Each structure stands twice: as C-alpha cells, then as structure tokens.
Image (cartoon, helix red, strand yellow):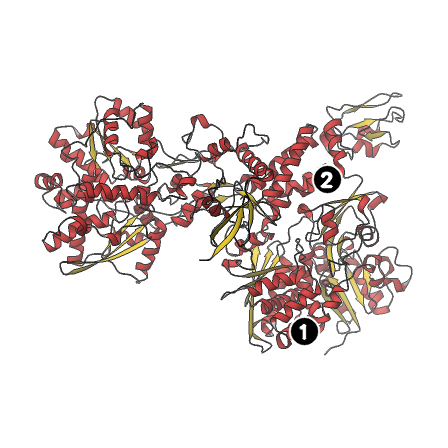
C-alpha cells in the first residue's frame, strides 16, 4: 500500500492511498458528520451530510466515498460546507415525522444528534410530508416509512450482507420509499426476521415489535407463574444500554434486574444450550454412523431456519431437528419443571430475553408447542428488556450480586459460547470429542477450537475424533450462508457438520441487541468486542463441556432417559417446511 | 444495377411517421404501379429532414424539390403531374418558394441555407434500413481506414486534434475521454453509447439513430479499437421504437457483412454490440445511472470518482459518449481533423444539432456550425416567431439549462458563451419563448419535470427540488412572499453545490437563470400578485374596459360559467370570484374592450 500526502483543513498528513476522505479525516481526528454511511456496509454517498470542499472540484464532494490522492486539498468546515450540510439536514427534517418525544430511538437517534450538533434551530423549508401506513404486521419487525430518511443502510444490509433482499428503494423522487416488492408487508415476503435492518437504522423507521406490555401484564397477573430465561449474548451487550463499555459482562446486574421486575424464576438459556448439544451431537453421530443425511446443519438460529425454508428448501433434511435452546427450555419448563415443581403448565408463562428478533417469529410457530402449550409465550429483545428496566426505574449499575436460579440455572462454558459465531460448533466438538473417543480431552486451551472462532465469513475445520476425520464449516451472516450452501450444492465442499447463524458475528450481533450508531460501529467491531466477553465468561466457568452439566445429566436420568429418546423427540425436536417466497409460489 | 430516373424520398422519422408517412409510402407504390413507373422511380424511406413543422415531407430527385404536409390524396397528383409529366406541384411546395422552379430545390430553402449538415448528412438522403446505401455514402470507410492503417493511439490523437467535445451536455473533450479509457488497464473494457435522450422536446439523437444508425455503429467500433474494448452497449430508450428497430437491423446487417463481430476487415479486431432498452427515466441519461441501469439495477447515479474511464460498467473501464458525438467520428476520420476544426469557434468546433421548438415558425431539427448566433437560428432558420410576436427568451439545455433573454440574442452559440450566460449547450434542446410566456411558469414547468424525474437517492434533489417547486407554486398562485424568493435562492445554490449527480446539480438552473434575467416577473407575482404575461391563472384578472365596452353582450353569451353580466348601455362586468380565467371573453370581444391584468 502506497502512502499519499494530503492537506486537510490546512493540516498536512500522510495516509494510505486506499483511504477515503472520511477515513483520512478520522485519522486526523477531524469529525465529519455522516448519516447514510456505515463502513463496509453502506458507502454510497447518498445523504450528502459529509460533503466537503475539494480544491479544484466543481461541486461539494461526499467525504465518505471520495478517494484520497497525492496532493489532495480538503476543507471540511468552510461556510459553503456548513451551509450545505445545514440546508440538506433541514430538508431531511422537513420530511421526517418529528415525534421525537415518543420515538423509540429518542436519545439514540443519529438524526436527532445531527440536528443538535449542526445547531438546527429552525426548519426553513417545510412542505409536503410522507403520510404512509406503518407496517406492523410482522411478529418481529415494525417499519415506519414516515420516519425513514432513505439512508438505505437497511437495504444494503438486507441485500448485500444478508443476501435476502426483501426491501429496496421503490418509486422515484419525493415518492421514493424503502419497501418490499409491490408494497407488500414484511410478513408477506420472504423476510427472515433477522432484524439486522433494525440494527443499522439511524432513526426510528425500523424497530422490533414491542412486546413489553404483554410481559408487564403477565407479571401483574398473580395467577401466572412467570419465568424468564436469558440467552448468553444478552449479558455481554445489555450494559451498553446503560452506558457501559461495549463488551462489558453484566450477568449479575441483569439477573438482579429481572428479579426486581418480578419474575418468579430467572433461568439461564445456556442450560438448554447444553441440552441442545447433547441432542445435536447424538443426532450427528447417529447420522454419521447410519449413513444419514449430511452435513448436519445447526438449527439454533431462527433467522437462518426461515431463510432455509424460503430459499434453500432442498437443505431442510440437513437441518438438525433440535429446537433452538430457548424453545427447548420453554418445553422443559412446561413439562419436566412443571411436574417437578407441581405447577400447572397452563399457568406457566415463559419469557425469553433474546438478542434476536427472529425468535419472536419462532415462538409463534404452531409446531413449537410440544406440551400442548406454546413453548415460549413472549420473546423480548435485549433492547426491550433495557426499556423495562428503565421504566421500572431500576438503578442498573448499582445492584446486589445475583445468580441464576436452580435447579435449571446451572450452565457451562459450552452453553455460553453459543452467543458467538462458531460457538455451537465448538461446544459440539467439545462433547463429540469425548463421546466418540470415550476419553476426556482435558480442559483449558485444548478444548478451545480456534479455527471455528473469529470473524472470517466462512470458517472450516478438520478435526480428528477417535478415528473419524470430522469436517466442519461455520458460516455467519446469511450472505455467507448462501455462499457456503451454493458450494455444498455444487459439490465443491463436503462436510459432516455445519453451523450457520443468521447474523454476522452470531448472536452477539443479533438484530435484537443494543443499537450502536454508525460513528461507533464504523470504527469498532461490535462483534469481536462482545464475543471477547463471551469467551471470557467461558473461561471463567468451572464446567465447560455440555455433557458435564449436572442439571442436564439429571434431566436425562429423571426424565428423558437418553439423548434422542422418544420423550426427547416429543419435547426437544421439531420439523420444518418449505415456505413460499411470493404469493403464487407453489413450493409447498 | 438497376438505374432509376427519379427518386421519391419519404421521411420515415418519428414525426412524419406520426403524421402519416407510412400511408404515403403505400399510396406511392400504388400510384407508381398504376402508371407503370415502378421500374423508373424508386421510393426511399429516409430519416428525418428536420423540417418537422411541415411534415410529412416528400422530396423528389433529381429536381430536389420538397413537398410538405403531403396527404395521401396528394400522391396521385405528384405521380401524374411531377413524375409522369415533369411538372412540379406548386401548391405543395413551402409557401414563398413556389414562384420560381429553381427555388424548389431544398438547398435554396431559408430553413437549410444556414445549416451545415454533417451528422445529419445522411438523414433524409439514404434509406437507413439498407446498409449498402450507407456504404455508398462512404459508410464504414472510416472504420476500414482505422483498422487497416492506424494505430489506436493515432486514432485518439486525431480525435483530440479535431477539438470535438461531447455533445451530450458537458462538452468534455472527446479525445481526452478516449485517451483516459485507453490508458486504463484491465482485461475487459466497454464502449457505451448514451441514447437515452430525455430533455422535453429534444429529439436529435432519435433522428440520428432513425436516419443514420450505421454512423453510430461504425463510430463505436472505431472507439472500441481506439480504447481497447471488444464489447459495446447502446442504451436507448424504449420509447424510440423506430430507432430501436433500425438499430437492430443495422447491427444485424453489419454483422452479416463482417463489419461487426470477429476479425473485422481481417484486422484481427473483434467488436460486438448489444442494445439495452431504457424504461424512460430521465436520470438514466446521467452516465453513472445509465451504467447502473445496464448492469440490471435500479437506474441511479453513483458518486464520481471513480470515473467511468477507470471504473464504469461492472467496474471495468468504460467509454461513454452520446449519439451525436459518435456520429461525428466517421466524418472526422474521413475528412481529417483540420476539416472538422475549421468549422466553429475557438473552443467549440464542428456543428451542433438542435431541436427547435416552442414559439417558432419552423419547429424541427437543425444542424448549425458552432458560433451561429441565436438570432440567425430564430429569425433565419427558424423563420421567426408566429403571429409577429416578440422574442422573449430561448431555453437552452432543457431542464438542466437556462434561458437566454432577448438582450443576448446576438450570442454566438458555443459551449462557453452559453455557460457564461447561465445556460448550457445541453444535448441540444432549444425552446423559443415569446412575449406571452411567463418566466416563472417556465421555471415551474422545468422544475416539475426534474421533481418528477429525480431518482430520490440524495436529499438535495429528492426533497430540495420538491420544496423549490412548492415555493414556485405559491408564487404563481399569488401566495408567495419575498422571503420565498430568498429561500428559492438558498435552495438553488445548495442543491447545485451538494446534489449527487449532474441531474440534481443542474436542476435549479431554470430557476437561477430566470431569477437572473426576469426577477421583475417574480417580484410582480409576489408584490403585485399579478402575472405580467397573463399565464398564471390564479392571479390573472380579466377586466372589461368601461369606455370601450359597447354593451353588446357577446362576452356574456360566450362565457362558459356565466360570470359576466350587464345591461344595455352600461358597461358589462366580470364577477372575479366566479371567473375561471379561460380568456374566451377577451377572444370574442369585437371591440377589444377586455384586457388581462388591466
């Protein structure tokens, strides 16, 4: 890489020649406002907030896409630049539904922040505004086009990163909106409900379907036995909602908050993750030994499952029949736990706190009610939990030390790492290695499978397991999943076991996690910061292998007998179906 | 080869086709057969003559006399009188040129005298559907010369020496563009032709494609050789069916003769061409949007740099020129760069085709040497303003351009003079406005167009032009304030500076230029709530002049809404609340007693 000399606001600096003006400015610690920009995801120069003067250029140029070159002279704060940014922002605001006080993104809205930073005290160019219907038909995602600023981050995320493409810009000029084909609602199109669009929306145009009211009502209902379970990725991100640094583990504060909110029991989904590993590894070994359908593909990520049902129905038989951990847990609570505690399962109300919006859709699947009751009653995202904690005026940062409840609160490091890409694979390998060889592989570094960790889009590993050379692959982000599946389909790659997570980076970066603005996530990788906390937690645990989880062992002894038993199938396994992509599809 | 004693040329351009020239063709065939002339007289369906106002056009050679506004029932007479007896049908000639037979020759017509037809040279001369006619007029000779005698760099140098600048609007030196693309290193390069002509009223490119499609194909092949590209795309709007049909035929014919495809002229050079149809979005005429559209995506501009010469179609080096630019290339190669640069002004060489429209007698297509004055175009070629009205301004460059007011009618038409006056060459739309045109209304018209055609990608264009239009609507409705004019200026300045693409950056031009030359009209709308030209209905008042009114009652009887009342011997009155400003009363008043905005 060559270095070039440039001048930015009269300061001479040397930067790599593949930098944009925005990156060079960042390097020089000069702030340029942005709105549509999201590094690596949406670099389209559309919003014109980052315009700068470039010496010799006819018009103002967008810093986010303008490449540096030797001798470039840049001015980021001339009167013309400031005036232009203000006028553009006033124009955007003139067609934005400014109900900031009641907006879910108030205080975390990038547009609001820009208006404050650019000192917009008056909007001079008011006129016609959007008056469009809000799409709140999906169980997971709400789209409000009246708040949309057409930055198109969601479009790039859905199309380029996830390879799903159910939203794009439609219509032209002032009538341009982001919508699905033929203005269908999100539940009418093959949306995977992954919620990555929400995670990148700078404003309140995209949000999760808020289910906190249902939980408040359940908590207030004295007849109900309200139980909450939390996924591993929640504890490493929830703190961000309360101003703590990215990657802070707040397990105790979270548990304490949940108790204060009034949940009867606070359980750790990790326990069910261990159960999942027991079932899934059993399934894997069985398929390998009996010549069953391979590769076995994980089924923990409901966004991935829906993706597979819409776009790759030919892989449905490859999917593990295991329910996702929180659904297993829900089924367990309404059967095993209910019996054990002597509670009427009809009175048990299960709330899952998940980093995920697709799990809201998943919980509604009719097939996920093996006990006769829905496994899970309500799924809340990490953000919704934060909202409840704030609403209840809980001082999140100053709470007494609290632990998950027994008997089902015990978890292992294997369950915790489910939260990061490669985690399910690693947990499975830890168990498979010992089950197949019948020997302990030990503890410490030797149980850490580094080849399946990290942020490479598709990771591959070959592991020797007692005479079997197990070939594994891990993909995170649906775009990568698509690439991997195409390779498998074309016969270019062969695996025994494949882990796929819908969200880039896995659950730590799920669509229900706290939203970080572009100016943070463009420069800090949320995925690795949060994953680091996950692996820290794993290392801090005494038990790090699923099959060593005492609670899980007990469940098999007392209830399921063994992995893959009839009872296990009734409660812990499910099935899938091909789904149509557009009305008129006759796939199913 | 069969030799004919006479040729009947019928215009097959879109304009004349629309006014019935296809039927004329059939009728001629019938009449010629009837008179046993089918082996003596040849009928040729040509491209556009440019004299669209008087279409359908029929020209008979060897006399070269032009019959205008020909109807099916005239054909019998033309055949029997002219072709059988040798007598010119005087009544069908352009009025004023019928007295002497010699004046029948089209080259004597005032409309053609000051024109110099280079790119339109074959239009109205050859049958565009017959490749041999193109070849007979030296077609593909330039390509032969280039491929067999010249190195790519020599071609580029020659184009650079000619001084040719892009005819699509920007006026960028063509040779330089070719050089940039030639210098870019990649395994694949592309050559594209922008035929997405979208300015309201402009049809230069359409006429070239309809009348001489091979000239563009030949030029693109030459360009491909010069820059090192083996694949070309012509992006043409689907609303140009005749052009598309003839282009397709031309490509097939050229391939059949080995003038396109593999190993052209045995030189080892391969070049293929494909047509891509645009759905008619104006923004797809912007080069990056055009390429995005060819790639199969929503036609939207992308930021530059990188420029197409380095990263164009599918991120490969791409040369993009407009139809008219290409149509100049074979001529420059054949006649030499010095020949080309001998025409025009210091910095604008050659000729330029304009679509002349609006309040002008000779609506049509004209090709003039650069440097011709606006006055010559309006009064000599254009035949002046209808009904002897006064020339007020000419809108140059369509919705991206600006107006040139009467005080600058002596301006020499070239790139730089127009820019100086706040207008631009654009692709060649020239709309003439007379004294009855309201300049605020004109600005509104063009802004309505850009608001409609904005792709919606960047806020300055998407929302800014909309807000400008809302302000203009307020002003023409008599609800504007002085602050509104300030806001217009602020918006215009900032949209120009910050919009993503050329369409957005130039969208405010019609407003800026009318504000520059006709601010008084804006002020009249705002301060006095009147439209001086009487165009803006909301603030136009029809008033009966009391002294002139003879109480005849004709106005009241003709008023469609019955808002005029009066009695004998007393002046009539118009109820302003009920009046719909249709103007019928003023038109009907035998005593000229009714005035607008009196």
In the rendered view of the protein, which quadrant contains the N terminus of chain B?
bottom right
Q: Nearer the viewer, residue A255 or B79?
A: A255
Query: Residue B185: x percent and y percent?
Result: 52, 65
Please tell me how crowded label 2 is: few (under 14), some (14-19), or many (20+) other residues with Cα within 10 Å: many
Write the residue at 79% across / 59% down.
B115
* Residue B138 sits above or below residue A565 on the image: below
Query: Residue B78: x percent and y percent?
Result: 82, 63
- Chain of the residue on which disc 2 is drawn: B
Q: Residue furthest right?
A: B99
Place residue B468 in its image quadrant.
Answer: top right
Q: Nearer the viewer, residue B34 or A479?
A: A479
- Chain of the residue on which disc 1 is drawn: B
What is the spatial separation of the Cα atoms under label 1 and label 2, in whole angstroms? 47 Å
Please tell me how crowded label 1 is: few (under 14), some (14-19), or many (20+) other residues with Cα within 10 Å: some
Query: Residue B229: x percent and y percent?
Result: 55, 67
Which residue carries the number 1 mark? B141
Q: Nearer the viewer, residue B113 or A253?
A: A253
Q: Is residue B198 visible?
A: yes
The disc placed on residue A215 is: none
Q: Nearer the viewer, residue B571 or A420?
A: A420
The disc placed on residue B514 is: 2
In the rendered view of the protein, which quadrant contains the C terminus of chain B?
top right
Query: Residue B357: x percent and y percent?
Result: 75, 49
| Residue A423 horizontal side relative to residue B162, left or right | left
């Amino acid at each position: 890489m060559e270095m070039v000399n440039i001048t930015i606001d009269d300061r001479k600096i040397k930067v790599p020649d593949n930098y944009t003006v925005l990156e060079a400015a960042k390097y020089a610690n000069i702030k340029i406002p942005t709105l549509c920009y999201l590094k690596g995801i949406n670099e389209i120069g559309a919003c014109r907030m980052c315009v700068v003067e470039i010496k010799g250029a006819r018009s103002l140029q967008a810093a986010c896409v303008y490449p540096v070159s030797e001798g470039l002279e840049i001015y980021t704060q001339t009167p013309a630049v400031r005036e232009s940014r203000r006028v553009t922002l006033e124009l955007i605001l003139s067609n934005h539904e400014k109900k900031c006080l009641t907006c879910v993104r108030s205080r975390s809205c990038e547009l609001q922040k820009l208006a404050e930073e650019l000192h917009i005290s008056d909007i001079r160019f008011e006129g016609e505004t959007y008056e469009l219907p809000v799409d709140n038909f999906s169980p997971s995602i709400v789209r409000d086009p009246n708040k949309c600023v057409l930055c198109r981050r969601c479009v790039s995320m859905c199309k380029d990163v996830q390879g799903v493409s159910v939203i794009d810009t439609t219509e032209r000029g002032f009538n341009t909106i982001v919508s699905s084909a033929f203005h269908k609602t999100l539940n009418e199109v093959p949306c995977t409900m992954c919620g990555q669009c929400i995670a990148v929306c700078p404003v309140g145009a995209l949000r999760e379907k808020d289910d906190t009211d249902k939980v408040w009502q359940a908590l207030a209902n004295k007849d109900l036995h309200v139980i909450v379970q939390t996924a591993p990725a929640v504890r490493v991100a929830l703190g961000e909602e309360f101003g703590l640094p990215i990657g802070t583990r707040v397990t105790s504060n979270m548990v304490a908050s949940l108790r204060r909110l009034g949940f009867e029991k606070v359980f750790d989904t990790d326990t069910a993750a261990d159960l999942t590993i027991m079932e899934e590894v059993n399934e894997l070994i069985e398929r390998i030994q009996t010549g069953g359908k391979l590769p076995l593909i994980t089924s923990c990520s409901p966004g991935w499952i829906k993706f597979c049902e819409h776009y790759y129905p030919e892989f449905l038989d490859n999917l593990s029949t295991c329910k996702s951990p929180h659904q297993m847990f829900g089924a367990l609570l309404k059967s095993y736990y209910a019996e054990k505690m002597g509670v009427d399962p009809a009175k048990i109300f299960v709330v899952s706190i998940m980093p995920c919006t697709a799990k809201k859709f998943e919980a509604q699947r009719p097939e996920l009610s093996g006990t006769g009751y829905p496994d899970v009653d309500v799924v809340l995202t990490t953000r919704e939990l934060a909202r409840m904690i704030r609403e209840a005026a809980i001082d999140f940062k100053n709470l007494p030390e609290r632990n998950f409840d027994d008997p089902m609160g015990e978890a292992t490091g294997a369950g915790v790492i489910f939260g990061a890409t490669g985690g399910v694979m690693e947990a499975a390998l830890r168990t498979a290695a010992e089950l197949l060889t019948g020997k302990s592989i030990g503890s410490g570094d030797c149980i850490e499978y580094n080849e399946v960790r990290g942020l490479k889009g598709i990771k591959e590993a070959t592991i020797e397991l007692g005479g079997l050379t197990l070939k594994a692959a891990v993909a995170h982000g649906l775009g990568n999943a698509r690439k991997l599946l195409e390779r498998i389909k074309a016969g270019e790659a062969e695996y025994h076991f494949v882990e796929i997570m819908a969200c880039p980076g896995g659950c730590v970066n799920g669509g229900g996690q706290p939203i970080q603005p572009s100016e943070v996530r463009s420069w800090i990788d949320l995925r690795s910061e949060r994953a680091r906390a996950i692996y820290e937690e794993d290392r801090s645990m005494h038990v790090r292998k699923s099959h060593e989880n005492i609670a899980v062992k007990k469940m098999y002894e007392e209830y399921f007998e063994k992995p893959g038993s009839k009872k296990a199938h009734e409660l812990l396994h499910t099935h899938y179906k091909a789904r149509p992509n557009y009305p008129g599809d006759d796939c199913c | 080869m069969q030799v004919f004693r006479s040729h009947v040329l019928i215009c097959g351009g879109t304009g004349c086709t629309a006014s019935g020239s296809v039927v004329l063709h059939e009728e001629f065939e019938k009449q010629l057969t009837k008179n046993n002339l089918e082996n003596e007289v040849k009928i040729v369906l040509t491209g556009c003559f440019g004299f669209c106002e008087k279409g359908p056009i029929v020209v008979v050679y060897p006399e070269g006399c032009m019959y205008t506004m020909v109807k099916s029932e005239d054909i019998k007479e033309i055949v029997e009188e002219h072709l059988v007896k040798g007598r010119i049908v005087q009544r069908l000639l352009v009025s004023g040129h019928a007295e002497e037979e010699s004046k029948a020759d089209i080259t004597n017509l005032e409309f053609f005298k000051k024109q110099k037809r280079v790119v339109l040279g074959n239009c109205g001369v050859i049958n565009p559907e017959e490749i041999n006619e193109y070849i007979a007029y030296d077609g593909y000779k330039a390509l032969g010369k280039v491929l067999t005698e010249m190195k790519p760099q020599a071609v580029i140098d020659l184009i650079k020496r000619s001084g040719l600048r892009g005819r699509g609007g920007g006026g960028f030196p063509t040779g330089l563009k070719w050089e940039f693309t030639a210098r870019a290193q990649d395994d694949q390069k592309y050559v594209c032709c922008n035929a997405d002509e979208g300015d309201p009223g402009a049809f230069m490119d359409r006429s070239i494609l309809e009348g001489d499609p091979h000239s563009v194909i030949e030029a693109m092949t030459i360009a491909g050789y010069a820059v090192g590209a083996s694949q070309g795309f012509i992006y043409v709007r689907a609303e140009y069916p005749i052009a598309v049909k003839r282009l397709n035929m031309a490509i097939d014919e050229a391939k059949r003769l080995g003038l396109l495809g593999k190993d052209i002229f045995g030189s080892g050079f391969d070049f293929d061409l494909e047509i891509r149809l645009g759905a008619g979005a104006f923004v797809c005429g912007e080069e990056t949007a055009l390429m995005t559209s060819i790639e199969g995506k929503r036609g939207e501009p992308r930021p530059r740099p990188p420029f197409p010469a380095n990263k164009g179609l599918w991120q490969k080096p791409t040369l993009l020129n407009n139809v008219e630019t290409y149509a100049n290339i074979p001529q420059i190669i054949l006649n030499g760069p010095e020949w080309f640069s001998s025409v025009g002004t210091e910095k604008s060489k050659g000729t330029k085709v304009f679509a002349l429209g609006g309040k002008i007698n000779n609506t049509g297509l004209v090709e003039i040497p650069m440097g011709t004055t606006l006055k010559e175009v309006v009064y000599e070629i254009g035949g002046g303003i209808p009904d002897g009205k006064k020339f007020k301004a000419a809108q140059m460059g369509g919705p991206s351009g600006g107006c040139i007011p009467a005080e600058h009618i002596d301006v020499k038409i070239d790139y730089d003079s127009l820019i100086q006056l706040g207008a631009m060459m654009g692709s060649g739309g020239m709309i003439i406005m007379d004294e009855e045109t309201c300049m605020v209304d004109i600005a509104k018209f063009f802004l309505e167009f850009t608001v409609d055609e904005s792709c919606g990608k960047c806020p300055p264009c998407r929302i800014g032009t909309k807000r400008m239009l809302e302000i203009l609507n307020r002003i023409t409705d008599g609800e504007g304030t002085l602050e509104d004019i300030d806001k217009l200026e602020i918006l215009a300045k900032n949209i120009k500076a910050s919009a993503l693409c050329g369409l957005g950056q130039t969208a405010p031009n019609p407003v800026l230029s009318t504000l520059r030359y006709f601010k008084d009209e804006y002020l009249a709308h705002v301060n006095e709530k009147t439209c001086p030209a009487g165009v803006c209905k909301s603030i136009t008042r029809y008033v009966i002049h009391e002294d002139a009114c003879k109480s005849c009652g004709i106005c009241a009887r003709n008023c469609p809404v019955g808002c005029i009342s009066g009695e004998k011997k007393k002046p009539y009155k118009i109820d302003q609340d009920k009046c719909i400003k249709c103007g019928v009363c003023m038109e009907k008043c035998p005593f000229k007693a009714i005035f607008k905005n009196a």
